[in-house]
Amino acid sequence: MNKTIIIIGAGKGISYETARNFGLKGYNVAMISRTLTSLQELETDLASQGVTAKGFQGDVSSASSMKDALSAVRAEFGEEIEVLLYNAASIRPGQPTSITPEDFLYDFKVNVAGALIAVQEALPYMKKESGSILLTGGGLALHPSAEVASLSVGKAALRSLAYSLHQELSSKGVHVGTLTINGFVQEDSYFSADKIAGALFKMHENKGDVEVVYEEA
């Protein structure tokens, strides 16, 4: 039976390695981002490795755009969704007193509200008992930084959203989890993108705690 993972915020790094990890295990990979050319490059790269992947243009800050993108995914790969990964983020330098309210609200849309939109749109099609909704968290949720105030608030809010979604959906057969990456993504290290992708797959397989803090012992 076909299994589909939808990766929102597709690009290089964690999204790419997650697409590769799941794809090599037989999953269809649907990738959503705003930039069509980068999606096409990812498609070609993954196809060369035997991964069935397709990109879909979508803007996480727009509910209508996300609805259209997810509808296109279902038309391509079928109605059922096994895994939804939200890995989109707006990373904007700025201290609390210097960021404009307009920029702050935009960042919140991308970092948090977009995840909620994606969940609401995908939920009716999530596989019960085997489906997972995964949110890419960050150490800023636990240790905020004034230098990236809007992202710190966003990661804290995303963590809270994961916990509340878990409370609501666990009894309905859909696992919700957040991987709190307490460090900087860096190749050839504990925080390499491929190792983080492996941790995300393990979360989906195990369906254990709502939060896994990914950090060196």
Image: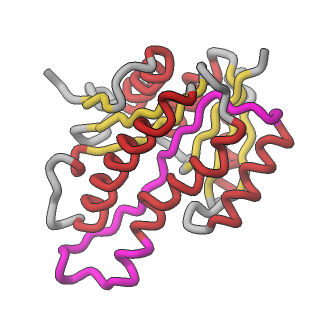
**In this rendering, position of residue 25 left or right of residue 175:** right
**In this rendering, position of residue 155 left or right of residue 10:** left
Expressed as whole percent of the image width and height from the top left, the position of residue 179 reads: 35, 34
Residue depicted at 60% across the width and 20% down the height? 130
Q: Examine the image and state in which quarter residue 46 appears.
A: top right
Expressed as whole percent of the image width and height from the top left, the position of residue 209 reads: 34, 24
Return the residue nearer the eye: 87 or 47: 87
Expressed as whole percent of the image width and height from the top left, the position of residue 23 reads: 64, 23
The quarter of the picture where the C terminus appears is top left
Q: Is residue 68 above or below residue 207?
A: below
Disc tally is: 0
Instruction: Specify how the rendered protein is coloured.
Output: secondary structure
Q: Is residue 63 above or below residue 32?
A: below
Magenta segment main secondary structure = loop
Return the residue nearer the eye: 161 or 140: 161
Q: Visible in this render: residue 44?
A: no
Q: Is residue 5 above or below residue 50?
A: below
The quarter of the picture where the N terminus appears is top right
Write down the region rendered in magenta: 77-106
Residue depicted at 17% across the width and 56% down the height? 144
Residue depicted at 44% across the width and 27% down the height? 200
Seen as rendered, the residue at the extreme right is 75
Expressed as whole percent of the image width and height from the top left, the position of residue 125 reads: 71, 37
Residue depicted at 44% across the width and 73% down the height? 106
Q: Visible in this render: residue 207?
A: yes
- In reply to whether residue 72 is colored magenta, the answer given is no
Q: Examine the image and state in which quarter residue 189 appears.
A: top left
- In reply to whether residue 83 is colored magenta, the answer given is yes
